[in-house]
Amino acid sequence: MILAASMYVQGFLRAWMPSNIVLDLIRTRRGLKWGVPGTLLAAPYLAIAYWCTTAIAAGAPGGLNLVVLVCIWSALKFLVMGPISLILLARVRLRERGERRRASRAAGYASADSPAAEPA
């Protein structure tokens, strides 16, 4: 029962948490360039976590500890995604450059083999 509840909560958070939605967008090919600026989104999450911890210390309900945990986890995800997106972007660009190089070689070989390329 606990496993089923944790799977439901994980599925809900995966689909509806703003940090997960933004990170999914960053992981796309078009979004990889936004990985490093996306690390700046860790600051609001850390600010919310700090505000909640000061509120807890001042006597707020202890349930805010869950908010602190979620905010710190989201901030860490954004901090880690910056360097990872740089690595993924470099790998994708190298692969694309290799594909363009192979395509241009294939086009060059095809035009050299065609009879239209021979001088008249």
Image: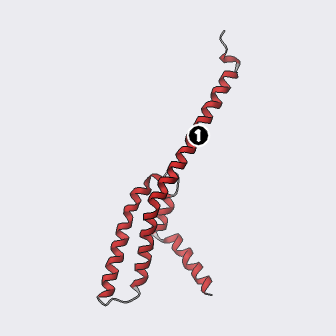
- Which image quarter is the N terminus in? bottom right
Q: Residue 6's x, y, as percent?
A: 57, 81
At a point 54% along the width and 79% down the height, the residue shown is: 9
119 vs 105: above or below:
above
Note whether residue 31 is visible. Answer: no
Q: Residue 33's x, y, as percent?
A: 45, 51
61 vs 67: above or below:
below
At a point 60% along the width and 31% down the height, the residue shown is: 104
Question: Callout 1: 10 Å neighbours few (<14), some, many (20+)?
Answer: few
Q: What's the amino acid at mark 1?
A: Gly
Of the pair 119 and 50, the residue shown nearer to us: 50
Q: Residue 30's x, y, as percent?
A: 49, 51
33 vs 101: above or below:
below
Instruction: Identify the residue under disc 1.
Output: 98
- Residue 47 quadrant: bottom left
At a point 45% along the width and 73% down the height, the residue shown is: 73
- Which image quarter is the C terminus in? top right
Q: In the picture provided, is 89 more to the left or to the right than 1?
A: left
22 vs 114: above or below:
below
Q: How is the image coloured?
A: secondary structure
At a point 38% along the width and 71% down the height, the residue shown is: 45
Q: Residue 34's x, y, as percent?
A: 43, 55
Residue found farthest to the left: 58
Count the marks: 1
- Residue 40 quadrant: bottom left
Secondary structure, mark 1, is helix
Note whether residue 103 is visible. Answer: yes
